[in-house]
Amino acid sequence: MKQKLVLAIFLMLALIGIAYAQMEIERCAEYLNAGDYQRAIEAGKRAVKLYPRSVYAYLCLGRAYSKTGQIDLAIENFKKAEAYATRDDDLMYIYNWLGYNYDAKGDLDNALFYHSKSLDLAKKLGDRNQEAIQLNNIAGIFHKKGELDKALEYYEESLRLTTDEKDKAPTYNNIAL
């Protein structure tokens, strides 16, 4: 009987800890949405400490670091999120953020690698919107590399997948550039 009580108390405390960590992840996301990136970092750090295997804790913390220009810390946290991710849709977004941050860092080869991985998952998941976004991101990298013909191919493919005319405007702008 005593053993069952101890087990019940342990489980209850574990659930409280998980719930508190989830609250910190939600706080991190709320601070990100509000543009309060320093508070997002603080909440993300607490979430990671409380729940060190949470994809979403690392993802939120990585996004907060990215928003503050702390690219190396962002990449470090996105890679930790990748290590714990088990769902393709989570990986698709993680790879997008890794690509974005490697691009910001000027590491175009790694940016291309991760955006391509995100594109592959978008295709696998049938997510045409993310597929168009990744094609646009890849085109931008080829543009930066000076491979304009290849960039144009990716921009045009992105346009073919985009059904809403107003969503095509950024791609048309990129082509014009």
Image (cartoon, rainbow, N blue to C red):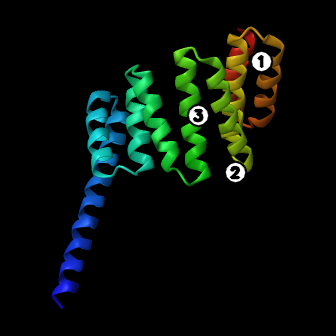
Q: Is residue 67 left or right of residue 157?
A: left
Please tell me in which quadrant of the rendered image residue 48 appears: top left
Whole-Å distance between the Cαs marked 2 and 1?
A: 24 Å
Whole-Å distance between the Cαs marked 3 and 1?
A: 18 Å
Q: Closer to the camera, 7 or 90?
A: 7
Q: Is residue 173 left or right of residue 71?
A: right
Q: Secondary structure at mark 3?
A: helix
For disc 3, the marked residue is 96
The mark that comes first in sequence, 3 or 2, is 3
For disc 2, the marked residue is 125
Amino acid of disc 1: Ala
The mark that comes first in sequence, 2 or 1, is 2
Q: Are marks 2 and 1 in contact (CB under 8 Å)?
A: no
Q: Where is residue 102 shown, x and y percent of the image?
A: 55, 22
| Residue drawn at 34 percent across, 28 percent down | 35
The mark that comes first in sequence, 3 or 1, is 3
For disc 1, the marked residue is 151
Amino acid of disc 3: Asn
Amino acid of disc 2: Leu
Q: Secondary structure at mark 2?
A: helix
Q: Where is residue 170 shown, x and y percent of the image?
A: 66, 21
